[in-house]
């Protein structure tokens, strides 16, 4: 990391692995953080779809959500990104909690009644800020403990290119032309939030 925006970063250990990146616990300027190091294949795939490098794209998307009025309590804070010849990385606030998918499953679907209205509020606040096609699913919501001990849902993954920004995509074209309501995909995601079939299929594909 020497000579980059991440100089002085201390890597503490591996937290996990996703389809696009490896994630490490880290400490940066005295702050606990999560370091996402992107896989070369993910970097190349993203480059074919969008003009911004993957780390830069996710940083900007994360920043847009975090800065939107009212959304900061529900979004992990973006810290810094690095794009260079040796790879790409993104540093973000580390969230201590449990993925909603496992939080829900381990409680036999008996979760506090206040959680889902907060997830609905995330979508509402995003739409008010002009942010649509939220990457909203049970593996992208971390349930953390709030200041008063209450469970709070927080988003942390922002590398999905929104459909309305996808060139050559028929749905994206209809959205840009105003022939489809920009709210509809997010409303559908909310209705199907507890339908985990797609999430579980993706998990099986990954671990196979």
Image (cartoon, rainbow, N blue to C red):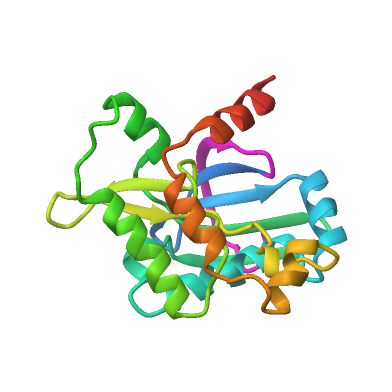
The image quarter containing residue 110 is top left
**Where's residue 54, x and y in %?**
72, 61
User: Is 11 a magenta residue?
Assistant: yes
**Where's residue 16, x and y in %?**
55, 35
Classified by dominant secondary structure, the portion drawn in magenta counts as: loop
112 to the left or right of 49: left
Looking at the image, is 33 positioned above or below residue 138? below
**Where's residue 132, x and y in %?**
55, 69
Please tell me which residue is depicted at 73% across the width and 70% down the height of the picture: 174
For the N terminus, the quadrant is: bottom right
Residue 114 in view here: yes
Looking at the image, is 39 positioned above or below residue 4? above
User: Is 45 a magenta residue?
Assistant: no
13 to the left or right of 4: left
Residue 8 in view here: no
For the C terminus, the quadrant is: top right
Q: Which residues lie in the magenta part?
A: 1-20
Please tell me which residue is depicted at 64% across the width and 57% down the height of the picture: 159
């Amino acid at each position: 990391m020497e000579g980059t925006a991440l100089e002085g970063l201390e890597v503490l250990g591996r937290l996990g692995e996703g389809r696009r990146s490896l994630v490490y616990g880290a400490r940066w300027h005295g702050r606990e953080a999560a370091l996402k190091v992107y896989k070369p294949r993910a970097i190349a795939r993203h480059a074919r779809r969008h003009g911004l490098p993957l780390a830069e794209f996710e940083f900007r998307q994360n920043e847009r959500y975090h800065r939107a009025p009212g959304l900061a309590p529900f979004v992990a804070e973006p810290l810094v990104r690095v794009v260079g010849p040796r790879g790409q990385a993104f540093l973000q606030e580390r969230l201590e909690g449990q993925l909603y998918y496992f939080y829900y499953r381990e409680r036999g679907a008996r979760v506090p009644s206040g959680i889902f209205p907060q997830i609905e509020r995330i979508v509402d606040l995003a739409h008010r800020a002009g942010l649509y096609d939220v990457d909203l699913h049970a593996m992208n919501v971390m349930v953390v403990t709030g200041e008063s001990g209450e469970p709070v849902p927080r988003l942390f993954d922002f590398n999905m290119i929104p459909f309305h920004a996808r060139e050559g995509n028929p749905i994206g074209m209809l959205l840009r032309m105003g022939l489809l309501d920009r709210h509809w995909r997010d409303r559908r995601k909310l209705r199907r939030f507890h339908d985990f079939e797609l999430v579980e299929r993706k998990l099986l594909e990954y671990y196979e």
